Structures are given as structure tokens and as C-alpha cells.
Amino acid sequence: MPTIITHTVVAVAAGKAFSEGPMPRNFWRAAIVSSIIADGDVVAFFFGIPYSHFFGHRGFFHSIFFAFLLSIPLASILWEHARPFPRQWWQYFLFFFLIGSSHGLLDALTDGGLGIALFSPFDNHRYFFPWTPIVVSPIGLRGFFSQWGLEVMISEVTYVWAPLLICLAAFRVVIRKFYKHSLITAGPAIGKIN
Ligand SMILES: [Zn+2]
């Protein structure tokens, strides 16, 4: 996996690119949760669930479908409104779905471990992209504070942070100029649960 630092950077950078005006803390918390929660599946190792199992690390919880499922309660909690599914609800849903899906897609760019069950539960094959420039992150803190951890961070800054920040900055300039109304705003409901 890329480190949770990089998944968090993706969430915050995307949040900055897709939102307009100050957003409440719960928005940022939900964005970060959706970007890193998939790696909660490492607990499978402690329960003796094999890596390659449906619920093993990089299994179902790393799938695009799980990101889809998770986005529904996140959007609903953040946008409680009398009218069901207003446009803002869909904006939150799409944003969290994008962030959640990015986790498995970024992991599929790493050069080690088992692949990612991106299409689980419909297809449980573990996938990698043909190009895997990101050095796989060690599981656990001890490995992280080592030469391996340093190589991981260098590869993530080079292949994720730099291109992502450039693309999102360009995207933000374009969308603010032509499609400003489509950016996510705090709205009345989200403000009250700050
Ligand atoms: Zn992961």
C-alpha cells in the first residue's frame, strides 16, 4: 500500500480542489476516513485470515464496490436534509466514492504484496496495473522508519504527490472559471454538525 500519509494527502488535496469556501471539520474527517479505511483490513492478519482471502488485506474492503457502499452513509450523515437526495447529496456521494476508490487504484500501482480485489465481490481476482512505480509500503511502524520506508516516501512524492497536486491545481483553476456552481459547498445542514 502507499502509506496512510499519501492516502490522506490525496483526500485533502481532492477536498481542496472540489470544494468552495470553508468546509466543516466533519467533511475533512469523512474525506480522510474514506481514503484510509480500506487498510483497516490488515486486522485480518491478526485473526488468521489469509492475505488471499475474500476479507484478507487488499480484498473486498479495497474494492470499488466497498467505496460505493461506504459513500452512501458518509454522504447521508453529512447532508441531512428534508428533501431526499438533493443535488448536494450527490456531490458528497460522488466525492467520497472518488476518494474511496482512489485507495485501491493507488495500491494497484505498488510493486509488491498481493494485487487488489478492485472488482470484488463480482470478480475476486487481485489486480495490479501494468506499471507499478510506487514502492510498496511495509506493514507496521518499524519497517516504515528504515531505508525501505525512505524509498517508499520518495516514490510516493514522485509518482503521487507531485502529479496529483499539479493536476488538481490545474483542475481547480479550470472548474472555478467555468463550472464554479458544481463545486461542493458546506450548505446549511453540514454546517450544524461541525
Ligand atoms: Zn491499501
Image (cartoon, helix red, strand yellow):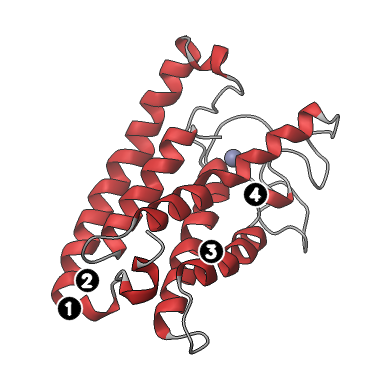
Q: Residues within 10 Å of mark 3 (few under 14, many from 20)?
A: many
Instruction: Mark 3 or mark 2: name the one nearer the start of the chain.
Output: 3
The answer to whether any part of residue 189 appears in the image is yes
Q: Splitting the image into 4 quarters, where does residue 9 fall?
A: top left
Instruction: Mark 2 or mark 4: name the one nearer the start of the chain.
Output: 4
Secondary element at image label 3: helix
Q: CA distance from mark 3 to mark 1?
A: 28 Å
Q: CA distance from mark 4 to mark 1?
A: 34 Å
Instruction: Mark 3 or mark 1: name the one nearer the start of the chain.
Output: 3
Residue type pointed to by label 4 = His
The disc at residue 144 is none
The structure residue drawn at horizontal position 29% and vertical position 60%, both measured from the top left corner, is 23
List x then y, in percent, for residue 79. 45, 73
Q: Which residue is mark 4?
A: 62
Residue type pointed to by label 1 = Phe
Q: Is residue 40 shown left or right of residue 193? A: right
Q: CA distance from mark 2 to mark 1?
A: 5 Å
Q: Which residue is mark 3?
A: 74
Q: Residues within 10 Å of mark 4 (few under 14, many from 20)?
A: many
Q: Residues within 10 Å of mark 1 (few under 14, many from 20)?
A: few
Mark 4 CB near ligand 1 (8 Å cut): yes
User: Of the residues tagged 3 and 1, which is closer to the observer?
Assistant: 3
Q: CA distance from mark 2 to mark 4?
A: 29 Å
Q: Which residue is mark 2?
A: 175
Q: Is residue 62 shown left or right of residue 97? A: right
Q: Which residue is mark 1?
A: 178
